[in-house]
Amino acid sequence: MKRILIADDELAVRQLLDLVLRGQGYEVMTAQNGDELVRMAQDHVPDLMLVDLMMPVLDGYEAIRQMRNDTRTAHVPMVILTARSTPNDVVVGFESGADDYVTKPFNIPELLARIKGHLRRASQRPVRSPLTDLPGNVLLTEELKFRLKKDEPFALLYLDLDNFKAFNDTYGFARGDRVIKLVAEVVTNEVHRLATEHDFIGHIGGDDFAILTHPDMVAQLCKSVIETFDQRIRMLYDPKDLELGYLPGHDRQGVPRRFPIVSISIGVVDTNRRIFANHEEVSRTAAEMKQFAKQQVGSSYAIDVRGSDQAYTELERRGQNQPPILLLSVNDTFLDTLHAPLEEYGYRTLEAHTILDANALLAHDLRPQLICADARLGSPLWEFAQTLMSDTPSTVLIVLSEDAEDEELAFTHGARAFIQLPFQVQRFLSCIVQFVRREE
């Protein structure tokens, strides 16, 4: 069902168009002003928009201009509804990015004919993305069908960005487009460097990308894309925001939040593990895995293994219903030493090497139930502890150190326990159990 978004400050006009369009089998959304129009179009991209020019808060001219500069809505047909039909009004409307205009009072049959015409033309989408020049969804679909018919093993990687909307809202759509181009460049370079000439790269639209490759290349390709993207995305942030490790903003409910650095999530399926009925099932499964990857902190990838065993089910079940434990240290060996017994005992852990990394993780609103911190972080740790105790006093802080003199300092700054290194595993675990109520 095609979705049409109507923006008009006159209730009678919205009600009339809603009634007429629903009668023609369209799904209809309505907005009362330009600002509401832009937000609704970004959250639920329509197939066509009917936009009044004279609206409060944000007029139709500016709303259309903003949506044309947004990769999520740039392709959507936009038809002006206006009582102003002077040549100058029409010219300004087209210069803002409108595709057509209809004057009020409008003729219903004519309006419906124009809508059908624009929807028909929009369905004949360009086969390549105008922003990245990569093959679009049409070519991706055809390539999936071809590879399934050829009956040779392949893997589909479905890539998507996390916290991209907050980046766009903060820096604007021009810099947002640079992020999209960065993804395209990183993916293209890494595929060409690691994979074969038979691999396929597609830009589905917005911040969604796809790669078709051989199953043997999946892990190496995912890790390489993530590592390169995580390094280069930081160059597109202002230094002050990069130092904070997050962007301040509001979520869709208007609640103040801290949005971490943009990361990339990758969902993976391959035909070696299971048999797919058609290309839609392949795409749907990859989308499921992408959503699973997005539950993790930072850039990550998730591979569907349900066709071979129940590893995916176990991974999804284990630890997902309890808050994580945050391990904080500059030393990888120290982190590994703590991680191993906690993982064996069934706890879900996160790891951070710096206070900046820890703040970025906390910005995800994961609310770790417990933090195990290395006293070698020094004064930044104590400042972090004071802020933590002030913001979330229920969070348990355990400090570990080789120096017994750090014990008094740790308790002074809100620690609930102090463990001197080297520690016995059982003592460490009993300390964890003492403070954490596990959900069985």
Image (cartoon, helix red, strand yellow):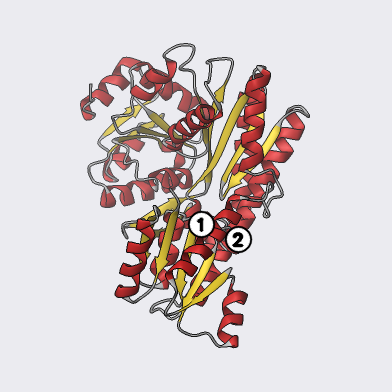
Q: Amino acid at mark 2?
A: Arg
Horizontal and vertical percent position of residue 16: 33, 69
Give the numbered dot on residue 175: 2
Residue reaching furthest to the right = 197
Q: Amino acid at mark 1?
A: Phe
Decide which of 82, 322 is in the foreground and name it. Answer: 82
Q: Give the vertical position of 315 relative to 325 (above or below).
A: above
Residue 153 position (above or below residue 256): above
Dot 1 lies on which element?
Answer: helix
Q: Provide the secondary structure element on which disc 2 rests.
A: helix
> Does the image show residue 78?
yes
Q: Residue furthest top?
A: 309
Label at residue 167: 1
Q: Alpha carbon of mark 1 to alpha carbon of mark 2: how far?
A: 9 Å
Relative height, residue 308 to residue 416 (above, below): above
Could you tell me residue 182's position as x and y percent? 66, 49
Residue at the spot x=40%, y=44% of the render?
Answer: 381
**Image-quadrant location for residue 176:** bottom right
